[in-house]
Amino acid sequence: MHVPNEAAVSEALSGHTMGTNWSARFYPSENSGGVDFNAAFDTIFAEMISELSTWDPDSFISKLNRAQPGERFQAPAHFRAVWEKACDFASMTGGAFTPFALPRLAETGFGPDGFDFAQEWTTDWSSCREMMDENGVIERPDSVLLDLSAVAKGYSVDLMAECLRAHGVSAFMVEIGGEFMTAGLKADRQPWWIDLESHAMGDHRVRLALCGQALATSGILHQSEFSGSGVKSHIVGANTTDMTKSVSVMADSCMLADGWATALMAAGENAMELANQHGIAAIFQARSGVEFSQAAEALL
């Protein structure tokens, strides 16, 4: 594990992308002095938006969603990587995670405009493997609309980390919208400390020490609408009648953490069993307190 020199001074960058804020804190390497990381990160964000943003009508995913059933497209690299992982999540979670969530998001007021959501759409995940061939050519099927936002942001964080590593930076923390990737330690020999936002009554705050791990949180607190009859959430499948407010996942990559956090939040009462079955380090926050999966307990 890399530890910077005690006299090393970290650099901090920040900005706005994908409807939220991003930040990076890192200790420069001998090879990174002349690198404009602001520009490098902006390039990453622009590529991700152009391929995967359902809010950009000119993005690849928006064009695919508007195409006629049966039309075929060569998927760009980032879309392909995220799509393949989304299909993995759908299979592993039995559909608790679905890449076809866009119509349901629109129903709850969290989706983009420009689509006929009045027609019958399916969120059945079982056909996703059949849509793309081994050469990365994807076919627009009937009755589905794609949304890969649940893993795209985490993947973007991983790309930020890869950019830093490519220039010899080995101690850093990068994040987009509260989804983190870390490496090494800080110059004071401390890990990268992250405080989870508390949703529980009483003193149940959780502080995590990250050094080489990713962290992502999915919840119904911020992107939700509350009413007397319950909660409308941006997480398709979330059981909004129970008391779970958020799920935080630690993993080796932010895309994994991002996808699992969403899947476990959507899985409702089956979430803990699913996390333990797959060895996922998950922290569940509810109004009554905090619960840890077996893998999360082993890390604490």
Image: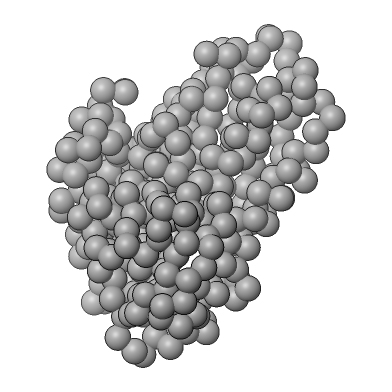
Residue at 19% from the left image edge and 59% from the top image edge: 242
Image quadrant in which the C terminus is located: top left
**Seen in the image, is 208 located left or right of residue 20?**
left
> Looking at the image, how many numbered discs can be counted on the residues?
0
Relative image position of residue 149 (x, y in whole percent):
46, 59
- The picture quadrant where one finds residue 46 is bottom right
Relative image position of residue 45 (x, y in whole percent):
65, 53
235 up-or-down from 63: above or below? above
Residues 202 and 239: in front is: 239
Residue at 24% from the left image edge and 33% from the top image edge: 279
The colour scheme used to paint the residues is: one colour
Relative image position of residue 16 (x, y in whole percent):
67, 54
Residues 31 and 235: in front is: 31
Relative image position of residue 94 (x, y in whole percent):
20, 55
Residue at 27% from the left image edge and 43% from the top image edge: 284
73 up-or-down from 281: above or below? below
Residue at 60% from the left image edge and 12% from the top image edge: 3
In this rendering, does residue 101 appear at all? Answer: yes
- The picture quadrant where one finds residue 116 is bottom left
